[in-house]
Image: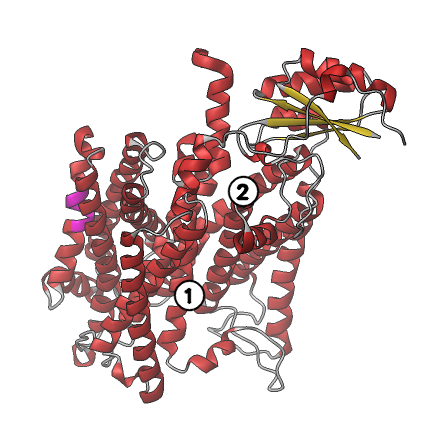
C-alpha cells in the first residue's frame, strides 16, 4: 500500500487535515510532531491514554506492599519498641506512602514504554524524517493505490507544504 | 504490487529526508554539546581534582576509622549530616519546578526545568553518599535494607532514619524517571542531528522516539501522572528528613514546625542553587534568548517569599522555646544566638533573612551580578542553617556536665569540598552531552506563538 508523507508548518492545519482524512474514511493516519500538541493527538485518536491504568495499578500495588511488608516483618520477629504495638499503623503510613509513589512512578514509566512502543532501536519508521524533530509536522497516510491522488489533493488543500510518496 | 500512476504533483518530489534548514531553537540549545569551551574544560578539571582528593580522603577515613572526623561527645552528627541535609534540600527545587509548576501550568518553567531537574538528580546523588560516609563502615550500609537474612532480623520501621532511607531512594528513583521521560524527545532531536558513536548512544537512549501522536499522548499522560506523584513526594521527603531530628527529644530539635520549616528552606536553598548554576551556564553558552529577565524575576520572587517563611520559622522557634517554659529548650536557644556557635547563627540570619530583602526592588530582581552573589550567600546561609540546627542543639543538651564542643576536622572539610566537586562534575558532563533546556517544551510555545500570530 502506498504511503503519503506530507509536511505542515502549523498545528491547526494538521488537526484539520487529520479530521478531514478521518471524515473521508482514511483511517491509517499517523502524525509526527516536534512538540506536544494535545489537539493533534485528540484528532488522531480521541481515546485517553492507557498509561493511567499503569499508574493506578502501580500505586495500589505500592500501598499494599508497603503496609504488608511492614506489618509482616514486625510480626515475624516481634520486638517491643517504645511500648507501642508490634504492628502500629500510624508510623507505617510513611513508608506505605513512599512505596505508593515509588511503585506508581515505576509503573507509569513502564506504561509509557509499553503504550508509546518505546524501546532502543536504530531503524525508525520509513516515513519519519529528521525534519519532524525540527519545527515541522508530518501527516502520514496509508491508503489504496487508487486513492493516492485524492489524499494528495486533500492534504494540499489543507496547507500541506510538501507531499511525497513512500512505498511501504 | 505495481505502483499506481502517480499523481503528477506527487511524482516530482523525493522523500523528505534531508534537513532543509534546522530550526534555530535546535541549533542554539544543542550548541553547547557541539564544542568544548575552555571555561568548561577548566571547570571540569577543577571538579575532577576535587573528586580525586575526596576519594583519597574517604579511603583514608575508611582505613583509619571514623575517629578522623571531628566527632566529640556529645556531638556525633557533624559536617556529614549537615551536608547530607544541605544537598537533599538543594534537590527540592528541581521537582518543585518540574512537577508543582507543571500542575499549576506555569509555562515560564520551560526554560529552567531541565537545568533544575539535572541539578536535583545530581544533588540527591551527592546527598545519598553522605549517610554512607557518615556510618564509617561503608560496607555495612546494606543493614538499612529490609531483606530476608539468616538471623531472621528485620529493620525497625518505627525509626525515622529508616523512613529516610525509603524517602530518599524513592525520591532519587522518581526524580530520575521524571528527568529521563522529559529528556527522551530531546535526545531524539540530538540523535537526528549527530553521527557515529554519538548517534548510536542517542539512538539507544531516545528509545526510538519519533514524536508520533500515540507517543506524545502517552508522554503527556506520563508527565501529568508523574507530576501528580512527585508533588506530594517532594513535600514528604524533606519532611521525613526533618523528622530525623524532630522525632528525638533533643532541645532545639523537638518541634512540630520542623517539617514545613525544612520544606520551605529546601525550596529557598534549591532556587538559590538554580541561580548559582544557571547564571554561569547561560552566560558561557549564550542562552540569553531562552533564560530571560522574566525567569530571573520569577525565581527571585520565589526566593523572597520562601525567605520570609524561613525567617518566620526561625522566629517561631524562639517564641516556642520561650513559651514552652522548658529550661533546656530556652537555654539551647539562648546559646544558639549568644553561645559558642553565635557566629554561625548570625551568618544564617544574615544570609537567609536579611540579604534576600534586596529582592524587593525590581531592578535588583533582574540584575544578574546581584542575583549571583545573593544566591551564593543563600547557599552559604542554608548550609549554616543546618550547622546551627545540628551542632548547637547536640552540643548543649539537658545536663551541663554532658556539654561539649565540636569543630569540623580537615577530613570533614575535604569531604565537603568533594561534595561540591562531585556535584559539579556530573553537572558539567551533563551539559556537554544533553540539551540543558527542554527543547520540545520551548518549541511548543514558539510554534504556538508563530501559528497564532500576534493575536495571542
Residue B352 among magenta residues: yes
The quadrant in which residue B278 appears is: top left
Q: Name the residue under label 1.
A: B128
Q: Which residue appears farthest toward the right when viewing the image?
A: B1
Q: Looking at the rendering, in which quadrant would you find the C terminus of chain B?
A: top left
Q: Residue at x 59, y 36 (%)?
A: A130
* Residue A128 vertical placement versus B67 (above, below): above
Q: Where does the image place residue B345, in percent across and percent down from the top left?
A: 16, 58
Determine the image quadrant of residue B216: top right
Q: Is residue B416 above or below residue B109?
A: below
The one nearer the camera, B111 or B409, is B111
Q: Mark 2 points at which residue?
A: B228
Q: Position of residue A115 (x, y in %)?
A: 70, 43
Q: Find residue B118 and report its horizontal and vertical position in percent.
A: 42, 51
Which residue occupies the extreme bottom position in the image?
B64
The image quadrant of residue B149 is bottom right
For the residue carrying disc 2, how many other residues have a C-alpha within 10 Å: few (<14), some (14-19), or many (20+)?
some
Q: What stretch is highlighted in magenta?
A: B351-356
Q: Does the magenta-highlighted stretch encompass residue B16?
A: no
Q: What element carries label 2?
A: helix
Q: Position of residue B44 (x, y in %)?
A: 32, 60
Amino acid at each position: 500500500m502506498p504511503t503519503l508523507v506530507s509536511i505542515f508548518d502549523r498545528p491547526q492545519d494538521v488537526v484539520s487535515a487529520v479530521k478531514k482524512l478521518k471524515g473521508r474514511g482514511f483511517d491509517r493516519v499517523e502524525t509526527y510532531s516536534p512538540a506536544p500538541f494535545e489537539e493533534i493527538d485528540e484528532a488522531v485518536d480521541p481515546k485517553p491514554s492507557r498509561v493511567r491504568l499503569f499508574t493506578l495499578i502501580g500505586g495500589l500495588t505500592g500501598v499494599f506492599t508497603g503496609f504488608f511488608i511492614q506489618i509482616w516483618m514486625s510480626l515475624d520477629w516481634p520486638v517491643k519498641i517504645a511500648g507501642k504495638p508490634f504492628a502500629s499503623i500510624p508510623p507505617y503510613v510513611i513508608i506505605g506512602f513512599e512505596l505508593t509513589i515509588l511503585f506508581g512512578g515505576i509503573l507509569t514509566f513502564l506504561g509509557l514504554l509499553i503504550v508509546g512502543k518505546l524501546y532502543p532501536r536504530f531503524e525508525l519508521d520509513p516515513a519519519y524524517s529528521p525534519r519532524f524533530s525540527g519545527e515541522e509536522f508530518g501527516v502520514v497516510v496509508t491508503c489504496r493505490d487508487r486513492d493516492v491522488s485524492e489524499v494528495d489533493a486533500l492534504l494540499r488543500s489543507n496547507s500541506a507544504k510538501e507531499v511525497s510518496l513512500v512505498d511501504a | 504490487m505495481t505502483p499506481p500512476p502517480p499523481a503528477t504533483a506527487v511524482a516530482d518530489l523525493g522523500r523528505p529526508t534531508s534537513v532543509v534548514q534546522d530550526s534555530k531553537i535546535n541549533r542554539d540549545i544543542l550548541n553547547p554539546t557541539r564544542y568544548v569551551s575552555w571555561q568548561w574544560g577548566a571547570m571540569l578539571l577543577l571538579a575532577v581534582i576535587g573528586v580525586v582528593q575526596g576519594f583519597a580522603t574517604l579511603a583514608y577515613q575508611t582505613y583509619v576509622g571514623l575517629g578522623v572526623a571531628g566527632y566529640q561527645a556529645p556531638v556525633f552528627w557533624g559536617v556529614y549530616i549537615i551536608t547530607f541535609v544541605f544537598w537533599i534540600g538543594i534537590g527540592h527545587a528541581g521537582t518543585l519546578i518540574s512537577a508543582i509548576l507543571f500542575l499549576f501550568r506555569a509555562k515560564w518553567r520551560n526554560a529552567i526545568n531541565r537545568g533544575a531537574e539535572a541539578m536535583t538528580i545530581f544533588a540527591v546523588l551527592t546527598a545519598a553518599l553522605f549517610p554512607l560516609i557518615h556510618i564509617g563502615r561503608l560496607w555495612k550500609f546494606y543493614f538499612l535494607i529490609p531483606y530476608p537474612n539468616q538471623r531472621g532480623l528485620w529493620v525497625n520501621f518505627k525509626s525515622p532514619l529508616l523512613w529516610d532511607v525509603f524517602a530518599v531512594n524513592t525520591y532519587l528513583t522518581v526524580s530520575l524517571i521524571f528527568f529521563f521521560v522529559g529528556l527522551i524527545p530531546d535526545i531524539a532531536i540530538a540523535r537526528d542531528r549527530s553521527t557515529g558513536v554519538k548517534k548510536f548512544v542517542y539512538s539507544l537512549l531516545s528509545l526510538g522516539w519519533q514524536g508520533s501522536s500515540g507517543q506524545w499522548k502517552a508522554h503527556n499522560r506520563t508527565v501529568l501522572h508523574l507530576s501528580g506523584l512527585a508533588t506530594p513526594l517532594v513535600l514528604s521527603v524533606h519532611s521525613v528528613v526533618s523528622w530525623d531530628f524532630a522525632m528525638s527529644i533533643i532541645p532545639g530539635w523537638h518541634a512540630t514546625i520542623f517539617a514545613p520549616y525544612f520544606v520551605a528552606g529546601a525550596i529557598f536553598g534549591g532556587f538559590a542553587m538554580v541561580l548559582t548554576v544557571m547564571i554561569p551556564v547561560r552566560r558561557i553558552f549564550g542562552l540569553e534568548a531562552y533564560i530571560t529577565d522574566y525567569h530571573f524575576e520569577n525565581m527571585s520572587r520565589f526566593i523572597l517569599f520562601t525567605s520570609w517563611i524561613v525567617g518566620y520559622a526561625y522566629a517561631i522557634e524562639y517564641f516556642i522555646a520561650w513559651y514552652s517554659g522548658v529550661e533546656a529548650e530556652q537555654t539551647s536557644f539562648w546559646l544558639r544566638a549568644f553561645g559558642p556557635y553565635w557566629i554561625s547563627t548570625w551568618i544564617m540570619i544574615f544570609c537567609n533573612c536579611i540579604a534576600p530583602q534586596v529582592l524587593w526592588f525590581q531592578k535588583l530582581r533582574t540584575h544578574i551580578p546581584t542575583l549571583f552573589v545573593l544566591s551564593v550567600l543563600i547557599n552559604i546561609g542554608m548550609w549554616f542553617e543546618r550547622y546551627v540546627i545540628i551542632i548547637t542543639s547536640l552540643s548543649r543538651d539537658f545536663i551541663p556536665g554532658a556539654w561539649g564542643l565540636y569543630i569540623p576536622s580537615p577530613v570533614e572539610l575535604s569531604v565537603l569540598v568533594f561534595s561540591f566537586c562531585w556535584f559539579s562534575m556530573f553537572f558539567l558532563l551533563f551539559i556537554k552531552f544533553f540539551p540543558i533546556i527542554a527543547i520540545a517544551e520551548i518549541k511548543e510555545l514558539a510554534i504556538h506563538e508563530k501559528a497564532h500570530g500576534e493575536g495571542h
